[in-house]
Amino acid sequence: MDRRDGEKRDSWSVPIAPRSSAVDSPDVEDLDCWLCPSEPTSILLELSVGPADDEDGADLFAVTVCNLAWLADRADDRPIGLRHHVLVSPGTSFGDVRQYLETRVNACTAGTWQAVAERVGRFAAWEFEDYQD
């Protein structure tokens, strides 16, 4: 079944529990050693998220992780603006960011994969967010 179709598995199934199987970044080679510096910084994180009972299937979600200095630096250019899919990390390690994101992903249980993906998509951009069949 294509997870984007939004159909329930069957009427007896339990809600779909998501799991984050991988976190990568095109901006940082070794995320496990990354510490958010004090100078203005932002990195892109790509999360692979899929149903907990499907080890092979996952969709990609993206979130920008930045520090307060990066936001302040951008405020000079645009004093008013929305920051969609941005996570502010005030000087923490990647381990802290990973734990925060895993907690958020795990809280997105729903009856269909579409609903799970939409919930995760509230804080990370889903690769199929604007997909049209």
Image: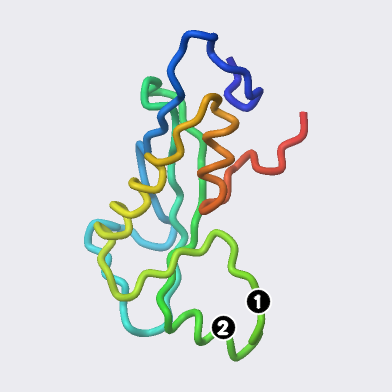
Identify residue for label 1.
81
Q: Nearer the viewer, residue 71 or 103?
A: 103
Residue shown at the point (34%, 75%) measured from the top left: 90
- Tell me if 9 is positioned left or right of 19 in this view: right
Q: Callout 2: 10 Å neighbours few (<14), some, many (20+)?
A: some
- Tell me if 69 is positioned left or right of 94 in this view: right
Q: How is the image coloured?
A: rainbow
- Residue 16, given in percent of the width and then of the height, sits at 45, 25
Image: 6 above or below 23: above
- Tell me if 132 is positioned left or right of 42 in this view: right
Under circle 1, the secondary element is: loop
Quadrant for the C terminus, please: top right
Residue shown at the point (40%, 48%) measured from the top left: 104
Under circle 2, the secondary element is: helix
Residue shown at the point (24%, 57%) measured from the top left: 95
The type of residue carrying mark 1 is Gly
Query: Gap in Å between the C-alphas at discs 2 and 1?
Result: 9 Å
Q: Nearer the viewer, residue 57 or 84?
A: 84
The type of residue carrying mark 2 is Arg
Instruction: Specify the label residue 42 is tagged with.
Output: none
Mark 2 against mark 1, which lies toward the viewer?
1
Residue 113 in which image quadrant = top right
> Among all residues in the image, which is located at the extreme bottom?
76
Image: 48 above or below 28: above
- Residue 130, given in percent of the width and then of the height, sits at 71, 43
Identify residue for label 2.
74
- Residue 108, given in percent of the width and then of the height, sits at 45, 39
Which callout, 2 or 1, points at the residue further toward the start of the chain?
2
Mark 2 in CB contact with mark 1 (< 8 angstroms): yes
- Tell me if 86 is positioned left or right of 105 in this view: right
| Count of marks, rendered view | 2
